[in-house]
Amino acid sequence: MSPRVRSVLSAVLIVLACLLAPLGALSTWAMYGLGDSGRYEATMAPLAADTDVRDAIAAGVTDGILREVHVRPRLQGPVSHFVRDAVRSFTETEAYRTAWEAANMAAHDAVMRALREDREGAVTVDLASVTERVKRRLADDHMPLANRIPVEHTEITVLEAEDLARLRKGFHVLEVAGFWLPVASVVFAAAGIVVAVRRRRAVLATGLGTALGAALLGAAITVGRSLTLEDLPPDVSRTAAGAVYDALTETLRFVSWLLLAMGLTVALTAAVVGAYTRYRRATETPRQAAPAEQSTQVRA
């Protein structure tokens, strides 16, 4: 294989590796970060104590209660304030954290089950199991009349039917890409370095390309956050949604920073080694030339 062909092939392999690295990180995060029930639960649990999330829940529950309860116009302000304070106080209890955990896991399990199966229709969650857990928690806390709380089967829609088919296709792609993209990225990078005529430059290019891909991934996370918050309905709290987005993407942001640091470290190491090698060659050349000059003078 000629040096020119080797250089072109090496460049193509390295470019593919640098492109697949951030895509592999994204697909792995989506598959094993969001798709895994244990990791999802560990991510969402701390949000129960988040101030913005609790305020958003208090506002939403208060609005729902006031829609069901008819209050005279002049009493709406005091009643709304009273109900909001009561709901806000409830968000500090263990029963609220139980409800938060149960509702989140019920929604997550329903969505993941729908994505893995081929059934059609909207994805719904029955709140009876959530109500039952909250009821048991309140009874354990000796709340009066807790055993009389009715456990009714109330279904809420978490994913519309028209969105399910599109998400299912993407989910099946992620199942494959989540494993093979990172592997392909490493294989292409190694092959590109081995094939290269100047391997030190190939290592330098791989490091810089990986760092660039990681920077683009970090920028995509930031842009995605802005687009997600802009598309929310007017009645949804932007601050609470931002807190949820940040919690879900925390691992992905960490991976992007890790790839950036690794890429820059590899590139810097290759550059330093190259500079040191050139320095040694430059210092050794005069030393080799000096004995040659001395032998020439002796012969003369």
Image: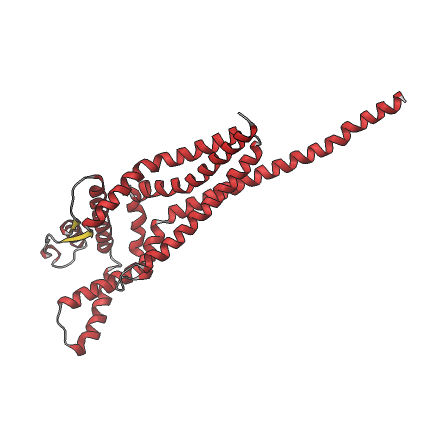
Question: Can residue 2 be seen?
Answer: yes
Q: Nearer the viewer, residue 166 or 123?
A: 166
Q: Residue at x 24, y 65 (%)?
A: 59
Picture coordinates of residue 256 (x, y %)?
43, 45
From this view, report whether residue 4 is shown above or below residue 74: above
Question: Can residue 51 be seen?
Answer: no
Disc tally is 0
Picture coordinates of residue 38 (x, y %)?
28, 42
Q: Residue at x 51, y 39 (%)?
A: 207
Classify residue 54 by image quadrant: bottom left
Picture coordinates of residue 14 (x, y %)?
48, 36
Q: Nearer the viewer, residue 35 or 175?
A: 175
Picture coordinates of residue 62 (x, y %)?
21, 65
From this view, report whether residue 86 is shown above or below residue 218: below
Q: Nearer the viewer, residue 36 or 85?
A: 36
Colour mapping used in the image: secondary structure
In the drawing, does residue 275 fall left or right of residue 250?
A: right
In the drawing, does residue 138 fall left or right of residue 292?
A: left
In the drawing, does residue 180 fall left or right of residue 78?
A: right
| Residue that lies at the very extreme toward the top in this rendered image | 299
In the drawing, does residue 284 fall left or right of residue 188?
A: right
